[in-house]
Image (spheres, helix red, strand yellow):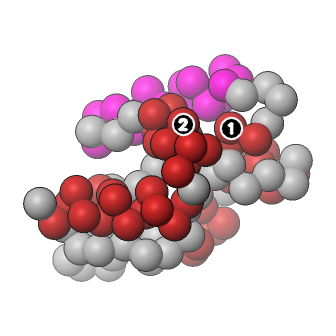
Amino acid sequence: MKEYNGAIPPCCAFCGKCPCYNKKNDPCLGAASYCKGSGCKVYRCSKKRGLNYCFECDFYPCNMFNKYSKRWRKYGQDIMKNQEEIKEKGAEKWLKEKNKECRS
């Protein structure tokens, strides 16, 4: 997997483990470009509420987030756990740790 140092999406999925980001042909550029352009409901909701991450919301975890998080499990990601880790460690430290995990 290639290293990812771009934006962390509001759902806190780690783009470095996403199959779209790691495609050889027509790769995704990560959350900064994909989430904005894809019409992602989670992205739109967080921006509408002025939030960086879903865990900042008074309604977290909402039904939409719970459904969305189930889809990420098939890619080996627990985005609810990612939310907790970012809240605890901060985004910069979390991103470094995730990239290190991918290299191991």
**Which-is-in-front pick, marks 1 and 2?**
2
Looking at the image, is 36 positioned above or below residue 47?
A: below
Is 13 a magenta residue?
Answer: no
Q: Secondary structure at mark 2?
A: helix
Q: Position of residue 102 (x, y in %)?
A: 21, 60
Q: Amino acid at mark 2?
A: Glu
Left/right of residue 40 with respect to residue 2 in the rendered view: right
* Nearer to us in this view, 58 or 36: 58
Question: Which segment is the magenta one?
Answer: 61-75
Q: Secondary structure at mark 1?
A: helix
Is 72 a magenta residue?
Answer: yes
Query: Label 1: which residue?
Result: 55
Which residue does the image show at 57% across and 56% down from the upper left? 90
Quadrant where the image shows the C terminus: bottom left
Q: Are marks 1 and 2 in contact (CB under 8 Å)?
A: yes
Looking at the image, is 12 positioned above or below residue 79?
A: below
Q: Is residue 91 visible?
A: yes
Which residue does the image show at 56% across and 70% down from the upper left? 7
Which residue does the image show at 51% across and 66% down from the upper left? 92
* Nearer to us in this view, 96 or 1: 96
How far apart are labels 1 and 2 at the CA level? 8 Å
Query: Label 2: which residue?
Result: 84
User: Which corner quadrant of the image does residue 61 belong to?
Assistant: top right
Q: Residues within 10 Å of mark 1 (few under 14, many from 20)?
A: many
Taking the view exactly as shown, the residue that stands out farthest to the left is 104
User: Which corner quadrant of the image does residue 78 belong to?
Assistant: top left
The tag earlier along the polypeptide, 1 or 2, is 1
Q: Amino acid at mark 1?
A: Phe
Left/right of residue 59 with respect to residue 5 in the rendered view: right
